[in-house]
Image (cartoon, helix red, strand yellow):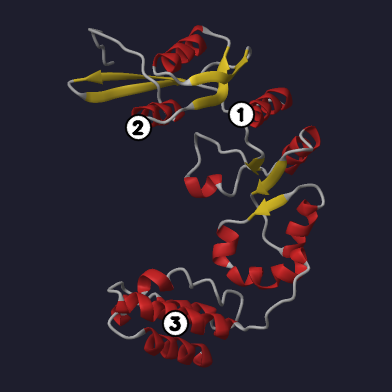
Amino acid sequence: MPVVSVNSHSFTLGGAGNVANNLRALGATVAFVGAVGGDAEGQRARTLFEEIAVDTRGMIVVSDRPTTRKTRIVAHSQQVVRADWESTAPLGAADRAAAVGRVADAGCGVFIVHARNAWLQGLSPKDNRELPPLRYEVVHRLKRDFADLTIVLNGGLTSNADIQGQLEHLDGVMLGREAYRHPWLMADWDRCFFDEPVVPRSREDVEDQMLVYMQRAVDAGEPWSHVARHLLGLRNGLPGARRWRQVWSDTSLKSESPRAVARRAHEMVRLD
């Protein structure tokens, strides 16, 4: 069993506290909003923030929650072990409302809230995007509690029906990976959600416009692949989509023009 002799110890801000410290070093005015426990570590965190002139009025003390603390034992400039004290449980409704209220008091009127909690231990980043449950009711309650604020939901929305269902409760929604993976989902949004006429266009029309953009990138000295990778979801759900993506992802074709690669891709679609 390793035994270490402690010669010195120190306390520093980590995580969001380190970001606040860096911003202060750049001359920014920083206010911190977050939860700490009603313990000595929570008071120490407040003191460390105040020492670097960070506004701590947004700190919420949760008496039954430990302040997150990570103890690192370092020997010969190498970390030997780290011990963590923390709670991964979500904040209760009252503490969550208090945090939103303090940010709103500082002048923020729009809140984009992710409905899925991140589990800090035991899950990969990919699993964290899929396995923790979606808690839409938490976001809905924030809107009920703060009717004058703009509350936008993020997380788990994959269809226009999903979006419409959330807009019945909230001011807006945010789509991230789904819009990237299935961009054609957005083709009907002007009509569905803004009562605006839809400009008739096909996926081929969009691809053709992207080819023009790719050629401009090539003429400016950038590989067309830097643009094409953002196009790969365009045909998802259609026959031949996989073959089409394979052609646009083929690194051996980088010396060819975008239009030449597009012709190859559509030939593969016809063969599928």
Q: Amino acid at mark 1?
A: Ala
At horizontal 51% and vertical 34% (from top left) the residue drawn is 120
> What residue is pinned by disc 1?
106
Residue 211 image label = 3
Asked if labels 2 and 1 touch by Cβ distance under 8 angstroms, the answer is: no
Residue 260, labelled with which disc?
A: none
* Quadrant hosting residue 64: top right
Left or right of 101 on screen, residue 240: left
Rendered view: 15 above or below 70: below
Determine crowd level at label 3: few under 14, some 14-19, many 20+ residues with C-alpha closer than 10 A.
many
Q: Residue at x 47, y 78 (%)?
A: 210
* Residue 55 point in image, percent of width and height: 50, 20
Q: What SS does tag 2 mark?
A: loop
- Pick the quarter of the image with the N terminus: top left
Q: Residue 158 vs residue 13: left or right?
A: right
Q: Would you identify the image quadrant in which residue 57 lies?
A: top right
Q: Which mark is residue 26?
A: 2
Q: Amino acid at mark 3?
A: Leu
Q: In 3D space, how far apart are the residues under numbered discs 1 and 2 (Cα atoms)? A: 21 Å
Q: Are marks 2 and 3 in contact (CB under 8 Å)?
A: no
Residue 157 image-quadrant placement: bottom right
Q: Position of residue 24 (x, y in %)?
A: 39, 27
Marks 1 and 3 close (CB-CB < 8 Å):
no
Closer-to-camera residue (29/44):
29
Nearest to N terminus: mark 1 or mark 2: 2
Q: Earlier in the sequence, mark 2 or mark 3?
A: 2
Q: Circle 1 sits in a helix, a strand or a loop, which is it?
A: loop
Tell me the CA gap for discs 1 and 3: 45 Å
Against 66, is 174 above or below?
A: below
**Upstream in sequence: badge 1 or badge 3:** 1
Mark 2 nearby-residue class (10 Å; few <14, some 14–19, many ≥20) = few
Residue 175 picture location, percent across and down: 62, 56
